[in-house]
Image (cartoon, helix red, strand yellow):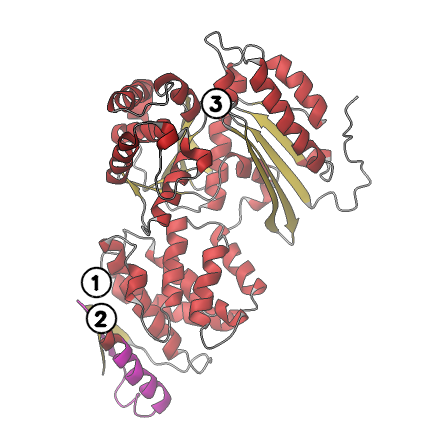
Amino acid sequence: MNKYQPITQEFSQPEQLYAAVDLGSNSFHMVIVRVSAGSVHIIGKIKQKVRLAAGLDEHMVLDQESLERGWQCLETFAERLLDIPVANVKVVGTATLRLAKNVDVFLQKAEKILHHKINVIDGDEEARQIYLGVAYTSANQGNSLVIDIGGASTEVIVGNDMTPIHLTSLNMGCVTFKERFFTDNFITEKAFSDAIQQAKALLAPVKNDFISFHWQQCLGASGTPQAITEILVTQGISDSIRLDYLYNLKQQCIDCIRIESLQIDGLTEARRSIFPSGLAILIALFEELKINDMQISGGALREGLIYGMLDNMQQNDRRAQTLEQMLEHFHVDAVHAKRVKNLALSLFKQVQKQHTMDKLDCQAALIGASMLHEIGLHIEYRQHHAHGAYILSHVPMVGYTQQLQSCIKVIILNHRSDINLDSLIPFQADIRERLSVLIRLVRLACLLSIRRKDKLLPTIDIAFDGNKCSLTFPAKWLKSHPLIDAELANEKWQQHKVGWKLECN
């Protein structure tokens, strides 16, 4: 008899704790959340590399060693699930368990260990759940292309907001491709070429279906995209994943000759063995689907399972909810935050007519930075801009991509005091240009709101001409408001020091 027993119905607060378990082809994952006052807080994550797909033989039978690895992992999960009401737990199996002919052998013992039913979901359901997890944690505008490269399958989805429109699951993954194309641990041009061509062949029947959708952004969910993003961040590159980066990483892999010698700054030991195979699949997807750039999402399958149990929360504006929660958690003056946001938006709408601001979700970045610009006061005043940037380096923002959160962090870092142009270096030139404008708008909105009162400001016109920003006030208004006049004089000097020009008339 299994030594772990399910929790009883007498659990004191059964509605508060939820768990999702994903028995993937490369790793088994469990995420545990607590729901409080309409907010979802992750309180636990467990991940173990099981590499189940590596145990599939040519007849699609899992060997005993891989079965044992899976069962041993679930022994760890089972104890943690004792604290979660049975009705609040979802356990799913994915590609390898779909493929394995002896899946019943695994499931029979696995369900006894967990004391929970395991649902082996088909590829379409896996894709749908992945999309929901991405959509909830990375709010988007318009159609989005979502890609998840797993151990034995790759899911590709086009959706709009919380609704997946078209999806597919392909039988290719970083573990199965590693076993097929990099089986001798040599990383060669031929191995990459063969893997890329096979991925393209599997993608060929469906690629036109996805190209026909006019999607506005591409989001990568976990796995290989996450590993590449970690490499870029470690190397000081705050940018989306682009094809030229992938080609560069491919050459770095080939230069290392063997997988055990693979050393790339930012690549973790846990991802090393399956990184070349995952990279080959991603290159094929970029080339065939004509992807210009990809951002990393905040969630995937596990988050989709969690939020699927919380249907009522899916209708909320994730970004607005995140900002409200952060204002409350860090004791920010919400009234003043909204005052600064409204003024910044008023200025932005004038500037938007003069500049192309579509490369970055500029309005979302402006709103986020304006609302959270005083978050660092939670620590202390003098360096609160730096404290705010530090907080945003460590606190996840549901509904925001990693790149967008990085932009908000940089704006907050520069919303007062000295302007740090070095903080813009990790971004691409086009994004640096837009960030420079957003920083100046938020600085001016904060400065002009210095008295923290409504209905004090007149109509203000703003215009940009290269590095010059011009503010126009009603005649004699500045002379009758010496505090703001003095603050603007200081702001002129701060901007002058970094080569920007501010004129006030």
Q: Which mark is residue 105?
A: none
Amino acid type, residue under disc 3 in the picture: Gly
Which badge, 3 or 1, is on the more N-terminal residue? Answer: 3
Q: Is residue 424 left or right of residue 178?
A: left
The residue labelled by disc 1 is: 354
The residue labelled by disc 2 is: 463
- CA–CA distance in space, label 1 to label 2: 8 Å
Q: Is residue 340 left or right of residue 436?
A: right
Which badge, 1 or 2, is on the more N-terminal residue? Answer: 1
- Residue closest to the far front: 261
Count of marks, rendered view: 3
Q: Residues within 10 Å of mark 3 (few under 14, many from 20)?
A: many
The answer to whether any part of residue 43 appears in the image is yes
The residue labelled by disc 3 is: 123
Examine the structure image and report whether residue 472 is included in the region drawn in magenta.
yes
**Are the two marked residues, 1 and 2, in contact with CB atoms closer than 8 angstroms?**
yes
SS at badge 3 = helix
SS at badge 1 = loop
Q: Is residue 283 above or below residue 205?
A: below
Say which residue appears at 32% left-offset and 78% top-offset: 459
Corner quadrant of residue 212:
top left
Q: Is residue 141 left or right of residue 476?
A: right
Q: Position of residue 322 (x, y in %)?
A: 51, 55
Q: Residues within 10 Å of mark 1 (few under 14, many from 20)?
A: few
